[in-house]
Amino acid sequence: MIKKRYILNFPPESGDKAFTYHLVKDYDIRINILKAEVFPGKRGSLLLELQGKRNNIENGVKYIQSHKITCEPLDKRIHFKEENCIDCGNCTAVCFAGALTMNRESWKLEFDKNKCVVCELCIPACPLNLFEIDFR
């Protein structure tokens, strides 16, 4: 079993279809919806965590893409300008997912993008504006 996160972008004609139901029923994929902005008749986006067998997830993603829905792995959509970070730790105070932590030995900020749920709380917390999250 593996877990992967994807951002799905729906065209207006796809916002009213039960894609997540088919992923569960037809592809045996567990779904965790982390963020949703879907409106029937308009463009929409879903941030999903998919859990299942690698082959099932790959086939489920192909199914989604066959309906003209873009499906991008999450790690392509999160940008942290680590080289400019001053390790102040402000962002760790708001990161409930535990993706941003301070290393207790080096006192350097560590970012684990696999734990990030794209809540966007780090964006206003960072005094240097080093986080960019694209969710359209």
Image (cartoon, rainbow, N blue to C red):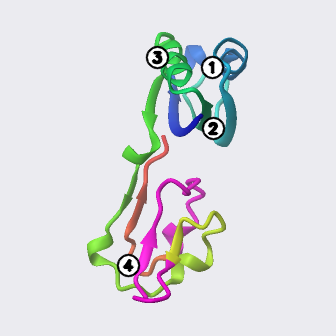
From the image, tell me which residue sits under label 2: 37
Q: Which residues are magenta?
A: 102-125
From the image, tell me which residue sits under label 1: 41
**SS of the residue under disc 3:** helix
Q: Nearer the viewer, mark 4 or mark 3?
A: 3
Residue 128: give its label: 4
**SS of the residue under disc 1:** loop
* Mark 1–mark 2 CB contact (< 8 Å): no
From the image, tell me which residue sits under label 3: 65
Q: Nearer the viewer, mark 4 or mark 1?
A: 4
Q: Position of residue 58 (x, y in %)?
A: 48, 21
Q: Is residue 114 magenta?
A: yes
Q: Amino acid at mark 1?
A: Gly
Between the residue at mark 1 and the residue at mark 2, the CA separation in whole angstroms equals 12 Å
Disc 4: CA contacts within 10 A as few (<14), some (14-19) or many (>=20): few
Disc 3: CA contacts within 10 A as few (<14), some (14-19) or many (>=20): some
* Mark 4–mark 1 CB contact (< 8 Å): no
Q: Earlier in the sequence, mark 3 or mark 1?
A: 1
Camera-nearest residue between 120 and 24:
24
Q: Earlier in the sequence, mark 4 or mark 1?
A: 1
Residue 81: give its label: none
